[in-house]
Amino acid sequence: MVFSTSKIVISGSLSIAIYAVCETKSYADNWACEVLLCLSNPGGPTEFVECRPSIHKLWKHLAKGRSFPVCSGIGFRTSRPGYEPYYCEAGYRLRQRNGDRGREATCVSLQPVPTGNDSCTRRWQDGRQAGQWERTQGLRVCVAYRLKPPHVRQRPRFVDLTIDGVAPQRVWF
């Protein structure tokens, strides 16, 4: 009788432990699938109120260096986490270089734009001319690439996510 009671207690404890593990895995799997569903929304991952807790949890999870959660049954890939603290507005590209004060970032216009004549008389430290003269409608105009300071991202870290082979989507956190 003692032997069978201990067997029942052990098997009951084991059943509870297995149920708890499966329940935790199921919750984790549901969270991962919910995250993928929210990320696939064209209006943005936090457009719907129901998605916000899961997405905020994802951002905290990834910010701690953890891997992207796995949703079984869906084919998806993620890149390694990346870091891009700066961005430029449309018509500009980001240029980074090592300067006197460490790593420096600048936004440079994609096309030269008309500037004041002083740009065509001024020279950079390496001897290159800052601007150049061009003929536009019979007039001599000084043009140069415009420089602007970059914008700083609120969430500078990212992963690129591809769900079922569809074009990758960048998720910022």
Image: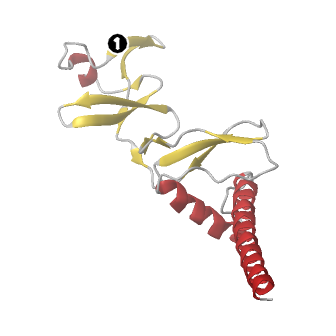
The answer to which image quadrant residue 10 occupies is bottom right
Residue 61 in the image: state x and y as whole percent: 54, 59
Whether 139 is drawn above or below 3: the answer is: above
Depth check: give the residue in front, 8 or 162. 8
Residue at point 27%, 23% (across, down): 119
Q: Can residue 61 be seen in this snapshot?
A: yes
Q: Look at 57% across and 50% down and name the residue there.
A: 67
Q: Position of residue 9 (x, y in %)?
A: 74, 83
- Disc 1 marks a residue whose amino acid type is Trp
Residue 40 coordinates in the image, percent (x, y): 74, 51
Q: Report the quarter where the N terminus lies.
A: bottom right
Residue nearest the observer in this picture, 12 or 78: 12
Q: Quadrant of residue 127?
A: top left
Is residue 162 in view? Answer: no
Give the x, y percent position of residue 25. 71, 63
Give the class, few, some or many, for how many residues have Cα within 10 Å of label 1's Cα (few <14, many ≥20). some
Q: Residue at x 48, y 48 (%)?
A: 157
Number of marks in the rendered image: 1
Q: How is the image coloured?
A: secondary structure
Q: Secondary structure at mark 1?
A: strand
Q: State the image quarter where residue 52 is shown.
A: bottom right
Which residue does the numbered mark 1 point to in the structure image? 133
Looking at the image, which is closer to me, 130 or 82? 82
Q: Residue at x 17, y 32 (%)?
A: 100
Q: Is residue 52 left or right of residue 147?
A: right
